[in-house]
Each structure stands twice: as C-alpha cells, then as structure tokens.
Image (cartoon, rainbow, N blue to C red):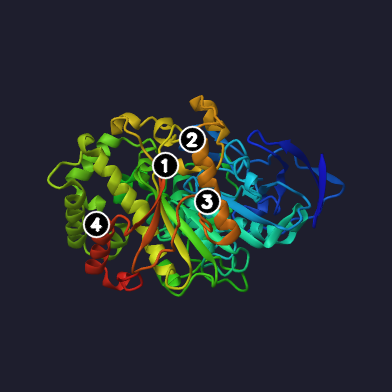
C-alpha cells in the first residue's frame, strides 16, 4: 500500500505490477466533488468536503447511472458518481511527469473511466500519469431548463471540477500541473473541443487530443434544449410549461426513469433514431454570477480563437459511420425511408434554418453524391456508412482543425490500422452487413491506447507481447505520449515518420495505419461537397466557417 496526502485528506492506493513491463501506483475511486444527489441533482458540481483519517483508493467509485446502448449490459450505476482514478509510474520522480487526463465517450449517454476499459498499462510505460474520470450523463448531466438551478452542461462542468482537482493535487502523485494533456474519444472528443473554448477550462491544460469527435459535430450540441426538456417531462407525466415546475417534478423522479428516455421534438428525429443524441452541450443563459461553461454559436466561438498557445491533435477513423448502426434501430426500415425521403440526409443546420424546398434539394444532392443512381438499401449500406461517417464526424472534425489552425499548432490524423484489435463492428454484430471486410470503426483506435480488458474477455483475445500487433500498440501509444510530452507526436526519427502540423494551405495529415504515412487534403471530394453545400445554402452559417 502507498499513501498520498491531497487537499481533502489522505488516500491509500496500491503498487501494481504491469503485465507489459514495470510497475505503477494506482489510486481508484477518488472523489473530486460532492455527490450530486438530492437537492444537488442537475446542478453544477459542488466543492468536495474533507474527510477524516485515511481513505481507501483501491476500488473504483460508482459509475454514472446509465443504460449502455453499445455493449447492451443493462442499467447500472449511481447518481453518486463523481470519482476519478490516478495511475502514476512514480510518486516521487526526479522530474514532474506529464499528465494525460482522459474523457470517455459513449454519446453522452453511457461510458465510464474504470480500468476494465481504460486501464493504464500501455500509457504509463512511457512515463506519463493517466487520470480517468466518471461524469454525469444524459439527463442527469445535460438537462437544460433555462433556469438558474438547471442552466445545462452539468456533466461537462463535472469534467472542469475534475481538472481543477488535478491542478490542485496532481503534484502529490509526481505529476506536473503545468503539463496536462486532455484527451477524449467520441463524445469525449467533442468535450475536448468545448474545453478548448470554454472560459471555465482556460489554463487547466496545456495540450489537447480529440479522437473522433468535435464541438462542430451536429450531435455535440442540443437543439432547442428547453423544448426537449418539456418533451421529456411530458413523457414522464408532467404537462407543465414552467421550467421551475418541471425542475421540481424531475428532481423527485427515481433515477431509473431518467435513463434512455427518447425525447424527439421533430418528425425527422424519429426517422433518424439511430443517429440522435437528445441531451448534450447547450449555450447557457447568464444567471447572476454563475459560471457559464459555454455560450454562443460554436463556429463563431471557434473563429474567435481557442485557448492561446494550446497545441491540438485530432482525427477520425476510416469507418466512423459504423457506430451509427449500433443503437438497435431497424436498419432496413431506415434505409427504405431514406431512399423514399432523401431530405433525411440533409444536415440539421439546413433543416432547421431553410425552407422545405431547400431541404429537399439538399437531400437529393447528398443522395446523388453518396449513392449515385443506386437506391439506398441493404445493398448500398457501405455508401450509407460512408455518408454517416462524413455527416456525423469527419466534416465537423476537419472544419474544427481548419479554423483552429489559423491561431494554434494543430495535427490531424486518419486512423486506419487493421489488426485483430479492431473490435467494434464485431462486438455489435454488424460485420456481416459489410461483407465481413476488415473495418476501422469508430472507437477502434482505443484498443491501441488501452488494454480494454472487458472486451478482451468477450472476444477471447490475449495480447502477445512479441507480436506485430503489440509493436503497433507501442508505436501508437508513443505518438500520443510524445504529443503529451513535447507537443509533437514525432519529435525524432524513432517512429520512421515525421508528422507535420496541419494548415489550411497544405492540409497535411498523418495516416496512422500499420505504417505511418504523411498525406495531404483528407477526404478531399467529400469535404469539398459539404463545404459547397453550406456555402450555397447557408451563406451566413458558412461565413463563420473556414474558406479556402
């Protein structure tokens, strides 16, 4: 056992032998804010109270109550979920260690930071400290009633509270509070981009890595959050239009009924059931002296600049769209409806801001771009996956990179590594839809940064330390930790490639495959198609985006 004093008291963790080499010190289930229960439900996290004596930090804290839509593990967790985990290779290193702060994905509805998924074994071998967190999800974390008690964004304010805890305490674990890299995947990647522009997050980190998610992704912000809250309350039996009355009603509901509740407010959302996220980041209204995490239009805010001096690395996987087939909706029915009513292919920004004639026109153009003269059907599901990847992920990620490259040093990648570690398509049982071809799905990159022990049990995989796959794990891990240490993924020639920063002119990016290759102009034809659509049909919207 090993003890460390933090501001609130003494923590007792343990020394762990790393099966992949060396050892590390583990501190699990460390609280970073008060439990958000009772009168604190839906509210911003409150400062943690000290404890007496020694607190054990050998077991994970509860995860946020959730219904996992991807792994289909059922409902589990607790509202008392604001805990983090710290894994450090040295408590008293000769020099303070870089810190990597991971924000899990899961569409803002599920996920957690425990080591059965996000263990430290790969990363800590590179002399970095790993911090993983739990934060509030779905309605518990992202309900917005436009009132002082529930202005929205509680779940991402949890992340800020965890970052502040790290700033105040990580030096006691051997970490450098002035060298923190935040990184996250999917919804976690979108959160990373929001932290890059949030006044609450400024100064809490030095670098940022956003994997397969951006604040510019359509799903990363909530459309009409108050209307959505009313729709939710109505489903649960509250007919009130008053935010305070809805708040009192929802505050008294058992947590079990607040999970996996669908709250569509337009007919098109019911057609797009597999790609909808109902509760995420909102533009907050000002109430007195309350801190606002985010306010305004994301493109306008990005154009005004991310945090000065912060270095950024972001990217996408080759088959991002696969994740959109995982939510359990009737795929064949969705494809039939999409073929009959191609306006469902129209971006939400245009659907919400243009007349129906424009929505129809854009839908037809989008269908032609991705399907040509073919029908949208099970026979063309590959094209549908491609469309989903671009619409839901790739376009927003590239736009965020373009805009931020004007003021900050940024790196862009496409992840296309293929080994037996690429797990997502198989674990959600849709590989056969893609003729069982090798895929590089959304979330497949995680298996090269974390052991994902829970998934290894399901897939009966064992990691051979003498294999080519483990060599890839080592190299990809080094890209991430190099960036955390130096702000450059390839500071020397040890990886056999030089990754140049991205800019609007040359648009250099790294293809992270079984080898590393520097390329230019990612997804050129598809990105130009989407840029052209926005330029033609939403010129005011496009004005806040990048123009070549």
Residue at mark 2 = 469
Residue at mark 4 = 525
Q: Position of residue 154 (x, y in %)?
A: 58, 57
Residue at mark 3 = 494
SS at mark 3 in the image: loop
Of badges 4 and 3, the one in the foreground is 3
For the residues bearing labels 2 and 3, Cβ distance under 8 angstroms: no
Distance Cα–Cα, label 2 vs label 3: 18 Å
Residue at mark 1 = 514
Q: Position of residue 462 (x, y in %)?
A: 54, 27
**Residue with the most extreme top position:** 460
Q: Position of residue 110 (x, y in %)?
A: 52, 43
Q: Residues within 10 Å of mark 1 (few under 14, many from 20)?
A: some
Distance Cα–Cα, label 1 vs label 3: 16 Å
For the residues bearing labels 4 and 3, Cβ distance under 8 angstroms: no
Of badges 2 and 3, the one in the foreground is 3
Q: Quadrant of residue 411?
A: bottom left
Mark 2 or mark 3: which comes first in sequence?
Answer: 2
Of badges 1 and 3, the one in the foreground is 3
């Amino acid at each position: 056992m090993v003890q460390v004093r933090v501001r609130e008291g003494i923590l007792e963790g343990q020394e762990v032998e790393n099966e992949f080499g060396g050892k590390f010190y583990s501190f699990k289930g460390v609280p970073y804010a008060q439990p958000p229960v009772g009168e604190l439900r839906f509210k911003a996290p409150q400062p943690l109270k000290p404890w007496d004596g020694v607190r054990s930090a050998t077991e994970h804290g509860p995860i946020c109550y959730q219904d996992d839509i991807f792994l289909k593990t059922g409902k589990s967790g607790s509202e008392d979920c604001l805990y983090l985990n710290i894994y450090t290779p040295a408590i008293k290193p000769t020099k303070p260690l870089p810190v990597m702060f991971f924000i899990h994905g899961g569409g803002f509805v599920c996920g957690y930071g425990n080591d059965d998924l996000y263990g430290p074994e790969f990363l800590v071998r590179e002399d970095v400290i790993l911090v993983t967190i739990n934060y509030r999800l779905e309605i518990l974390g992202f309900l917005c009633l436009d009132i002082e008690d529930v202005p929205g964004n509680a779940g991402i304010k949890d992340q800020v509270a965890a970052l502040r805890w790290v700033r105040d305490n990580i030096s006691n674990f051997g970490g450098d509070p002035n060298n923190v890299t935040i990184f996250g995947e999917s919804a976690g990647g979108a959160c990373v981009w929001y932290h890059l522009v949030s006044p609450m997050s400024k100064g809490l980190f030095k670098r940022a890595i956003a994997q397969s998610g951006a604040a510019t992704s359509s799903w990363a912000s909530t459309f009409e959050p108050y209307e959505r809250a009313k729709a939710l309350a109505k489903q649960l039996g509250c007919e009130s239009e008053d935010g305070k009355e809805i708040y009192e009603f929802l505050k008294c509901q058992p947590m079990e009924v607040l999970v996996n509740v669908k709250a569509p407010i337009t007919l098109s959302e019911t057609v797009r059931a597999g790609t909808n996220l109902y509760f995420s980041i909102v533009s907050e209204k000002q109430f007195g002296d309350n801190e606002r995490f985010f306010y305004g239009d994301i493109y306008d805010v990005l154009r005004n600049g991310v945090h000065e001096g912060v270095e950024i690395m972001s990217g996408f996987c080759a088959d991002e769209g696969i994740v959109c087939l995982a939510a359990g909706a009737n795929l064949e029915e969705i494809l039939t409806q999409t073929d009959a009513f191609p306006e469902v292919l129209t971006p939400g920004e245009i659907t919400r801001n243009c007349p129906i004639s424009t929505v129809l026109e854009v839908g037809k153009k989008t269908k032609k771009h991705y399907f040509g003269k073919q029908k949208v059907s099970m026979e063309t599901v590959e094209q549908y996956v491609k469309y989903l990847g671009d619409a839901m992920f790739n376009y927003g990620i590239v736009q965020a990179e373009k805009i931020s490259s004007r003021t900050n040093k940024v790196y862009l990648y496409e992840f296309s590594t293929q080994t037996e570690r690429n797990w997502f398509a198989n674990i959600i049982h849709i590989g056969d839809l893609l003729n069982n071809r090798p895929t590089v799905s959304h979330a497949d990159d995680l298996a090269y940064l974390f052991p994902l022990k829970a998934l290894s049990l399901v897939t009966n995989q064992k990691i051979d330390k003498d294999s080519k796959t483990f060599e890839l794990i080592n190299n990809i891990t080094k890209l991430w930790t190099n960036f955390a240490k130096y702000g450059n993924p390839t500071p020397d020639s040890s990886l056999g490639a030089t990754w140049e920063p991205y800019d609007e002119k040359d648009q250099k990016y790294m293809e992270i495959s079984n080898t590393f290759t520097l390329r230019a102009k990612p997804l050129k034809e598809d990105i130009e198609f989407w840029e052209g659509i926005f330029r033609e049909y939403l010129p005011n919207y496009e004005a806040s985006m990048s123009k070549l």
